[in-house]
Amino acid sequence: MSNFYELIQKMKKRASMYLGKPAITNLRSCLAGYILARLELGISQTEQEKNFTEFQGWIQKKFNITSSQSWDKVILFYSEDERTELERFFELFEEFVSPDNKTKLKSQDSLLESSSDFLLGKLLSSTNS
């Protein structure tokens, strides 16, 4: 059986076979169905599946979106047409799973933690004065 990311790569190569119509909404439904089926069967999530749950937040940061639009709707909005929306997903997915992105995300998280700690320390010291 393929792992989650291999399944996505298979869908990239033969979108019509896996999705019926090569559309990003079909891809999202297919991935959601895959995850739901595994949950219903009592199969615990893999690291890749857990990691993919961060894709929504990553897309929102990437496109500077604060609304609650799902990742497929965001990509669809920023695509030229239905043909390019799916291609765009696969480009963004490759960027999301790239080692460079993981390093960048970890350093951003560390920077946010440091900033939060600094601000919390300033706030606490000003209330104690």
Image (spheres, grey):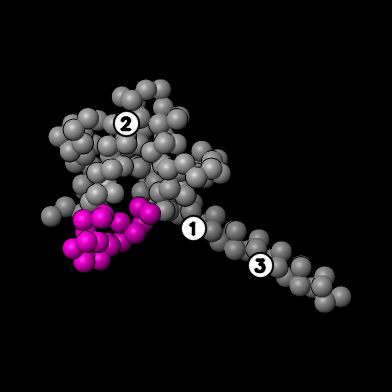
Q: Which mark is residue 1?
A: none
Identify the residue at horizontal 45%, vertical 54% (top origin). 103
Compare residues 40 and 24 and report the one nearer the observer. Answer: 40
Q: Residue 38: x and y, percent?
A: 21, 59
Q: Residue furthest left?
A: 1
**Which element carries disc 3, helix, strand or loop?**
helix
Residue under label 1, please give it: 106
Q: In which quarter of the image is the N terminus?
A: bottom left
Comes first in the chain, label 3 or label 2: 2
Judge depth for marks 1 and 2 and give the one in front.
2
Comes first in the chain, label 1 or label 2: 2
> Are there few (<14), some (14-19), or many (20+) residues within 10 Å of tag 1?
few
In the rendered view, tell whether residue 70 sits above or below residue 88: below
> Are there few (<14), some (14-19), or many (20+) residues within 10 Å of tag 2?
some
Name the kind of residue labelled 2 in the image. Answer: Glu
Q: Is the magenta stretch mostly helix, strand or loop?
A: helix
Residue under label 2, please give it: 87
Identify the residue at horizontal 36%, vertical 56% (top origin). 51
Q: Can residue 100 be seen in this view?
A: no
Q: In which quarter of the image is the C terminus?
A: bottom right
Identify the residue at horizontal 32%, vertical 36% (top origin). 25
Give the residues drawn in magenta, as a range: 35-53
Comes first in the chain, label 1 or label 3: 1
Residue under label 3, please give it: 117
**Which element carries disc 2, helix, strand or loop?**
helix
Q: Residue furthest front?
A: 40
Q: Residue 114: x and y, percent?
A: 63, 63
Name the kind of residue labelled 3 in the image. Answer: Asp
Q: Residue 114 magenta-drawn?
A: no
In the rendered view, tell whether residue 37 sits above or below residue 125: above
Q: Residue 128: x and y, percent?
A: 82, 77
Name the kind of residue labelled 1 in the image. Answer: Lys
